[in-house]
Amino acid sequence: MEFSIKSTRPEKQRGACVVVGIFETREPSDAARAIDKLCGDYLTGVLKRGDMDGKLGSTLFLREIPAFKAERLLLVGLGRKNDFGEKEFMAAIRNAVKALGASGAKEASFALTGFPLGKRSSAWKIRQAVINISDALYRFDQFRKNAADAPAFKKLSFLAPPSDDAKKLGDALAQGQAIADGVAFARTLGNLPGNVCTPTYLAETALRLAEEEGVACQVLERDDMKKLGMNSLLSVAQGSHEPPKFIVLSYEGGKAGGRPFVLVGKGITFDSGGISLKPGEGMDEMKFDMSGAASVLGTLLAVARLKLPLNLTVVVPATENLPGGGATRPGDIVTSLSGQTIEILNTDAEGRLILCDALTYVERFNPELVIDVATLTGACVVALGHVATGLFANNERLALDLASAGRESFDRVWRLPLWDDYRDSLKSNFADLANVGGRPAGSITAACFLSRFAGKYRWAHLDIAGTAWKSGVEKGSTGRPVPLLTHYFLARAGRSL
């Protein structure tokens, strides 16, 4: 999709289609009112007849409007004016895209970013519109013999009053496009089946990404991990014929030798649960268990394309978790890279076993801070559903900044505690700690486990088990939390809008 900004009034616009909003109870937005005035109250007549009521989700195409130079006008319902917020704004954008995609229009001009949206600026609305439009147009059909035709329209412009700051709007457009590219990259990786997206495929993808975006990449093999002492990670890989990979990418946009921000993404390319086998129903969705890896790679893509002035290192421990004759058994004890021993009571709590070695490994980078991203616990889904990502942190400032980035991106988080009281459930009679702490507070005890390996730097953990993908008729990867993380780095780079 080709995006642009036009500093012009909607009533003066020519072209294939102009998109304007109508609030519930048939109240035109300012853009619709201006067009109505130009065409002699033509829209007023349409609304009085009841052809469009303005309810959220409703759309109506109009053609051959008197005195209006565009070929078509698309009216999009915005819902109740007093209830109109970020969620409704993004829904209206997506509804417009859906209608345009079915219309055959090749280009369109949006006048949906000009009306008030609380304290949100025009730049914020344009950035979010780009992300949501790109997300709505995303298709994953590479395995379909008869894939649906892509929407015809390829050009979309945002109409902005001449008084708006053109540079800021241009920055918003660029940021939205970079974030959308990162989200699409993560979604595609997440949607790939486990027989395609193996640890080796992830490593090859990282190498291609590094070459295309001009960043450094190193891939450690099984023997490298053995020599380092990553026995916790390797214990998860024992049941699979696919070799594990440990991927490290380094983007250097900041000062040479400067301390990097570090992202660690869980890369379990398929999770059967190992010997602690999961139920068969829904197990196909365990291909999404590498969504943490996909999201940190997508974030690196966005950061690199925005050329942010900071250093960013991305680490992905990648393996499958399968049963087999060589698989780790419940009750086995392994020695992690940190030297701490772990009694593995449940092989389906494998994400923390690969992440703990990665969290120890990144100490060598003398990181500014570390954020790990993982589809870690079903307990987080129970606690927060599919709306908010679970946030844990050992640093107050980091937690506040991530929460702020979540609000700015509308990719929101909710903080949960890391109190020492919860660590007692991880005690083991035979090792330094156990890898599970029972059913109560499962997402918290999992985070407490990780915190045992992240004590030498500022650290946050994002549990995306409820937000990384959707089930049901909309089954597929969401690409979250690429928007959250990219907004966080935009703020660190002083590029917030």
Image (cartoon, helix red, strand yellow):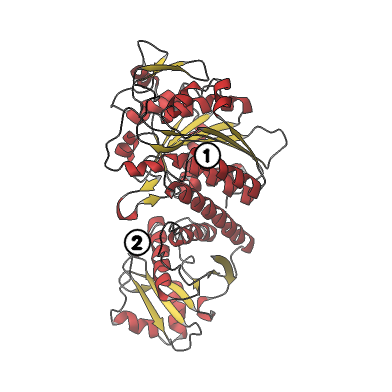
Say which amino acid is labelled 1: Thr
Q: For the residues carrying marks 1 and 2, which lies nearer the camera in this image?
A: 1
The answer to which quarter of the image holds residue 442 is: top left
- Residue position for label 1: 200
User: In this rendering, does residue 210 appear at all?
Assistant: yes
Q: Determine the residue positioned at 50% across, 75% down.
A: 106
Q: Which mark is residue 62?
A: none
- Label 2 crowd (10 A; few <14 / some 14-19 / many >=20): few
**Residue positioned 64% across, 50% down in the render:** 212
Amino acid type for the residue under numbered disc 2: Asn
Taking 173 as reference, is 216 left or right? right
Alpha-carbon span between mark 1 and mark 2? 52 Å
The tag on residue 82 is: 2
Horizontal side, residue 471 vs residue 357: left or right: left
Quadrant in which residue 248 is drawn: top right
Mark 2 lies on a secondary structure that is: helix
Pick the residue in front: 130 or 399. Answer: 130
